[in-house]
Image: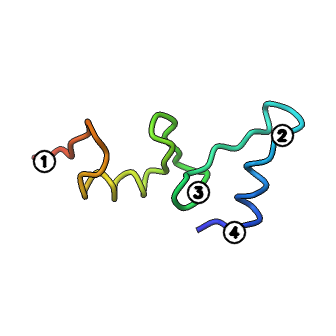
Amino acid sequence: MAKKSVVARAQKEPKYSTREVKRCWRCGRKRGYLRSFDLCRICFRELVTKGEVPGVKRSSW
């Protein structure tokens, strides 16, 4: 979990567009971010396992 102050800072409009930081909407993580789902890889995997992400199916071998 990211600190509340860090998440709040990321939501502010940056001075320059290159300073924009994309963060996971569930936990606030900035690394391993999947743009098409607005989630980090960890939260994405949890939600897919539960079946809460429509159109995505977990592969099994």
Judging from the image, the colouring scheme is rainbow
Picture coordinates of residue 61, whole percent (x, y): 10, 46
Element at label 2 = loop
Q: CA distance from mark 2 to mark 3?
A: 18 Å
Element at label 4 = loop
Crowd around label 3: few <14 · some 14–19 · many ≥20 (10 Å) = many
Residue at the disc numbered 1? 60
Picture coordinates of residue 4, whole percent (x, y): 71, 67
Residue at the disc numbered 3? 29
Could you tell me the amino acid type at mark 4? Lys
Crowd around label 2: few <14 · some 14–19 · many ≥20 (10 Å) = few
Where does the N terminus fall, quadrant-wise?
A: bottom right
Q: Earlier in the sequence, mark 2 or mark 1?
A: 2
Q: Earlier in the sequence, mark 2 or mark 4?
A: 4
Numbered badge on residue 34: none
Residue at the disc numbered 2? 14
Q: Earlier in the sequence, mark 3 or mark 1?
A: 3
Residue at the disc numbered 4? 3
